[in-house]
Image (tube, helix red, strand yellow):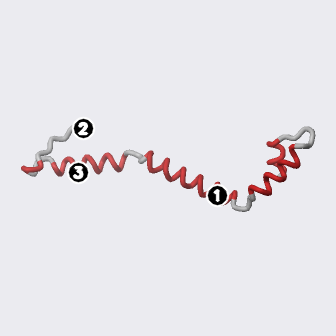
Amino acid sequence: PVIKVIATQNEGIEQLIKKIDEHSSKAPNDKKTFLLTEKAYKLIQNKRMKDVNKKELQKKIEKESKKEGFNLYRFIEEK
């Protein structure tokens, strides 16, 4: 809605505040939820990956990939 406000005459300010409050309480904050979700995802990812040594993983993949029938997805499931 359009709210007529004349600040110099103190008109419409209460109605504007009321409408802003109504709007903020109804509308979900999609951006905030998105940012919190992204942060949670990164935290979970870091927690789960903390014990993975990339150099050791590379050595294992190098060794296993030389075997016939190597499948990366199967390799990951077995580790």
Crowd around label 2: few <14 · some 14–19 · many ≥20 (10 Å): few
State left or right for residue 14 relative to residue 76.
left
2 or 3: tag closer to the N-terminus: 2
Per the image, the residue denoted by label 2 is 1
Q: Residue furthest left?
A: 9
Under circle 3, the secondary element is: helix
Q: Which quadrant does the N terminus fall into?
A: top left
Residue plotted at (88% across, 49% down): 63
1 or 3: tag closer to the N-terminus: 3
Amino acid at dot 3: Ile
Residue 74's tag is none
Picture coordinates of residue 44, whole percent (x, y): 63, 56
Residue plotted at (45% across, 50% down): 32
Amino acid at dot 1: Asn
Picture coordinates of residue 52, whole percent (x, y): 74, 58
As measured in the structure, the alpha-carbon distance from the residue carrying label 1 to the one carrying label 3 is 42 Å
Per the image, the residue denoted by label 3 is 17
Residue plotted at (54% across, 50% down): 38
Amino acid at dot 2: Pro
Q: Nearer the viewer, residue 71 or 31?
A: 71
Under circle 2, the secondary element is: loop
- Examine the image and state in which quarter residue 45 appears: bottom right
